[in-house]
């Protein structure tokens, strides 16, 4: 145990877990998924999924982690079901895959921050030109810069994880998360004063339910899962460092609420900025990952040199902060495995694992224009580059992971054991309403809907078949 470390307080755990949840998924991915998924109708589905399906999965992951004090690969075995460790193995692989490309995007954000500070707004224009040529790629220009920025980002992540749970992950989250929230509110306040802000808000907030179809329903669930860091064992790992005194259910509710609120509020910042850049016309947006990286630098550029530098740097600093508390949680999962099972010292494990993950990320790095092969050879219905493939694959695996985690808990580990774990730190859990909801959710609602939507997403992402 001494080797593993623990969170020093409830607030520290919540900051770290919310920090894991709040990331590029909220600020960069959520807006473009909203755009792709048809605006506000997507937002409504996302909210329903977050509370109905994701919150129970989160409680389950944290409960498994805290019960076993193990990394996801060993946790299932330690409950007496070693075959189910496969869930943890696939999850850990999935985490490696996510971090490998996530780090590249985080590196862009860091790069944009530095370019903004130097007053270089042209990056946006360079990107939009790159877009004209080839659909969905950006940062085509300077591959060397992307390499340097992504190495720096991986280094920062490793530095934090190397310092351990309470001395690294928790400490960083306690500084970064409050700063992030303050910065976000300042940015929303500013964005709402821009011309055309109302057009952005209308687009974001007025639902058109006609736009709902298989791919937007699946997209909303995928987004909720990703945003809440579910399905691969991040929260099993964080839960394994949590004290028995803490109330898992209320902590999970807070984490879910914080994540959803921050995604929602980020939309209030991003859509006015996009509307500002497009003079209020949101009909023909750059779709997909380029949405922010193309529109926003342009928006900052047209604010004028002084204020543009200030607002732009502030924005990308905010994104970098959000990303760092998430990359840290992704790296912690394979690191915990290496530390626990291979008995390697934390610092050594961190540099080893981070190095491997960086290498796994190279195809994603090259897949945005630098290498024709990695940009075009990975044909899916909606993309052709390696990074998108990695993202689609991991998103789909997360749903499958979530399905197996709840099914395992309800039918293999058994509900009474799950309930007993939750009752620790929660007096009166047995007779509470939330206990009834959680038990019904993990036994019926989640397995059914996650299984169904896994198939919907699989067919739609990989085969272009839309069932609804
Ligand atoms: N939730 C983070 C985000 O929204 C990303 C993330 C961190 C994640 N850990 C994860 C996603 C585990 C899936 C699984 O940016």
Image (cartoon, rainbow, N blue to C red):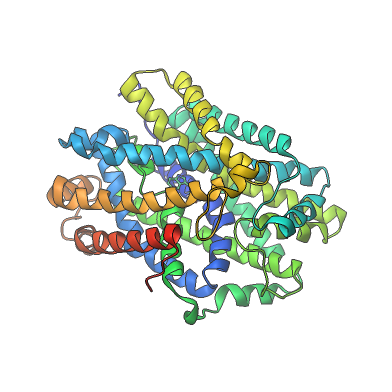
Q: Residue at x 82, y 51 (%)?
A: 122
Dividing the picture into quarters, in which one does residue 277 lie? bottom right
Query: In which quadrant is the C terminus drawn?
Result: bottom left
Above or below for 86 versus 267: above
For residue 419, side relative to residue 455 (left or right): left
Above or below for 41 versus 109: below
Does residue 193 show up?
A: no
Above or below for 263 versus 107: below
Does residue 128 show up?
A: yes
Q: Nearer the viewer, residue 8 or 229?
A: 229
Q: Position of residue 88 (x, y in %)?
A: 31, 38
For residue 78, side relative to residue 4 (left or right): left
Q: Residue at x 41, y 64 (%)?
A: 218
Count of marks, rendered view? 0
Query: In which quadrant is the N terminus drawn?
Result: top left
For residue 319, side relative to residue 227 (left or right): right
Q: Residue at x 20, y 49 (%)?
A: 409
Q: Position of residue 354 (x, y in %)?
A: 51, 28
Above or below for 328 versus 138: above
Q: Position of residue 247 (x, y in %)?
A: 29, 48
Q: Position of residue 355 (x, y in %)?
A: 53, 26
For residue 30, side relative to residue 194 (left or right): left
């Amino acid at each position: 145990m001494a080797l593993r470390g623990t969170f020093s307080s409830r607030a520290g755990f919540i900051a770290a877990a919310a920090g894991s949840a709040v990331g590029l998924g909220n600020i960069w991915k959520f807006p473009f998924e909203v755009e792709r998924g048809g605006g506000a109708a997507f937002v409504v589905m996302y909210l329903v999924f977050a509370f109905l399906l994701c919150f129970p999965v989160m409680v389950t992951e944290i409960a498994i982690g805290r019960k076993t004090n193990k990394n996801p690969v060993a946790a299932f075995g330690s409950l007496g079901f070693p075959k189910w460790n496969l869930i943890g193995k696939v999850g850990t692989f999935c985490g490696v895959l996510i971090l490998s490309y996530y780090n590249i995007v985080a590196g862009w954000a860091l790069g944009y921050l530095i370019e903004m500070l130097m007053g270089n707004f042209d990056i946006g224009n360079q990107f939009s030109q790159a877009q004209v040529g080839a659909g969905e790629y950006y940062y085509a220009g300077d591959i060397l810069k992307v390499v340097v920025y992504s190495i720096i980002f991986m280094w920062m992540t490793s530095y934090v994880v190397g310092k351990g749970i309470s001395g690294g992950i928790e400490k960083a989250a306690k500084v970064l998360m409050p700063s992030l929230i303050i910065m976000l509110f300042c940015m929303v306040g500013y964005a709402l004063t821009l011309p055309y802000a109302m057009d952005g808000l209308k687009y974001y907030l007025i639902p058109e339910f006609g736009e709902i179809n298989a791919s937007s329903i699946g997209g909303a669930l995928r987004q909720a899962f990703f945003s809440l860091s579910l399905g691969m064992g991040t929260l099993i790992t964080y839960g394994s460092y949590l004290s028995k005194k803490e109330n898992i259910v209320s902590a999970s509710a807070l984490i879910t609420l914080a994540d959803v609120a921050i995604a929602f509020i980020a939309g209030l910042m991003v859509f006015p900025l996009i509307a500002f850049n497009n003079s209020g016309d949101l009909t023909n947006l750059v779709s997909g990952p380029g949405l922010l990286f193309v529109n926003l630098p342009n928006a900052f550029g047209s604010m004028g040199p002084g204020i543009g530098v200030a607002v732009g740097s502030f924005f990308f600093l905010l994104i970098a902060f959000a990303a760092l508390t998430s990359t840290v949680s992704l790296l912690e999962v394979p690191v915990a495995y290496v530390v626990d099972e291979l008995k390697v010292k934390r610092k050594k494990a961190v540099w080893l694992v981070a190095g491997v993950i960086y290498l796994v990320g190279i195809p994603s790095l090259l897949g945005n224009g630098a290498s024709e092969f990695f940009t075009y050879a990975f044909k899916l219905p909606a993309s052709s580059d390696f990074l998108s493939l990695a993202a689609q694959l991991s998103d789909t695996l997360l749903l499958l992971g979530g399905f197996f985690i709840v099914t395992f808990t309800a039918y293999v580990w058994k509900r009474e054991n799950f309930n007993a774990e939750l009752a620790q730190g929660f007096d009166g859990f047995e007779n509470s309403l939330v206990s009834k909801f959680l038990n019904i959710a993990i036994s019926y609602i989640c397995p059914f809907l996650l299984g169904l939507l896994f198939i919907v997403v699989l067919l739609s992402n990989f085969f272009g078949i839309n069932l609804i």
